[in-house]
Image (cartoon, grey):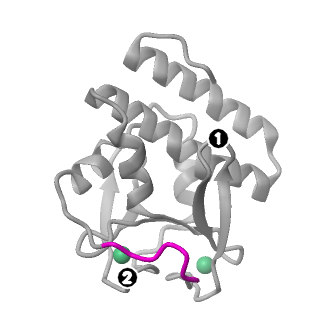
């Protein structure tokens, strides 16, 4: 699906979300900068991250140093783009991360607290960036596979991610 260009309201805290442009991918994502820090990706947005030597500096810079309000992650949410009820899924077995997904339009919402938790475990920015990227793939990437049933796509994502890791942290990835 195409980028949504209208301003959408955060499904967690109802504040207007801000569009952050990711130049290399030519897409916008929506981040709740005035509220909870959650991130909404539409279906196409995550596909444009695969197979590209893309990074998420724009996302990380946008949320850097900001204080976000706390939200109840267990509350049901409504898709801000199409209005369908979102479904909570444990997207990563390893990390037990829960995301909200819209089965109608393919949108996905990630709570900021999950990103923060992951990033707090690392001492260098390179490691934080690499692991945040891995996190995004582990959550949304895996669910894309379930939605699209394209296994080779995931394999491509994994090999891309491994190269990304290797170049960033100079060590063997466990992926
Ligand atoms: Zn919010
Ligand atoms: Zn939707």
Looking at the image, residue 155 sits to the left or right of residue 159; the answer is right
Point 43% across, 41% down: residue: 132
Does the magenta portion include 101?
A: no
Is residue 84 left or right of 19 when viewed as pictured?
right
One can see residue 6 in this view: yes
As helix, strand or loop, the secondary structure at mark 2 comes to loop
Mark 2 to mark 1 CA distance (whole Å): 27 Å
Please provide percent x and percent y for residue 39.
42, 64
Tell me the quadrant of the picture where the C terminus can be found: top right
| Quadrant in the picture for residue 16 | bottom left
Q: Nearer the viewer, mark 2 or mark 1?
A: 1
Q: Which residue is mark 1?
A: 94
- Judge by depth and name the residue closer to the eye, 172 or 59: 172
Residue 60, image x, y percentages: 29, 47
Residue 13 has which mark?
2
Q: Is mark 2 within 8 Å of ligand 1?
A: yes
The residue closer to the viewer here, 95 or 81, is: 95
Question: Residue drawn at (33%, 48%), measured in percent from left and top?
Answer: 23
Magenta span:
70-76
Inspect the magenta stretch and tell me whether residue 75 lies in it: yes
Residue, x 23% and y 74% (percent of image)? 34
């Amino acid at each position: 699906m195409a980028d949504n260009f209208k301003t959408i309201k955060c499904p967690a805290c109802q504040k207007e979300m801000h569009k952050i442009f990711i130049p290399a991918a030519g897409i916008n994502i929506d981040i709740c900068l005035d509220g909870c820090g959650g991130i909404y990706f539409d279906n196409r947005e995550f596909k444009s991250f695969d197979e590209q030597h893309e990074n998420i500096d724009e996302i990380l810079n946008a949320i850097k140093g900001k204080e976000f309000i706390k939200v109840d992650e267990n509350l049901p949410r409504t898709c801000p783009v199409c209005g369908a009820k979102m479904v909570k899924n444990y997207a990563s077995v390893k990390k037990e991360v829960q995301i909200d997904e819209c089965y109608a339009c393919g949108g996905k919402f990630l709570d900021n607290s999950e990103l923060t938790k992951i990033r707090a475990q690392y001492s260098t920015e390179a490691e934080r960036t690499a692991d945040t990227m891995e996190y995004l793939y582990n959550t949304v990437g895996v669910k894309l596979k379930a939605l699209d049933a394209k296994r080779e796509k995931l394999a491509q994502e994994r090999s891309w991610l491994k190269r990304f890791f290797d170049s960033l942290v100079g060590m063997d990835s466990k992926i």
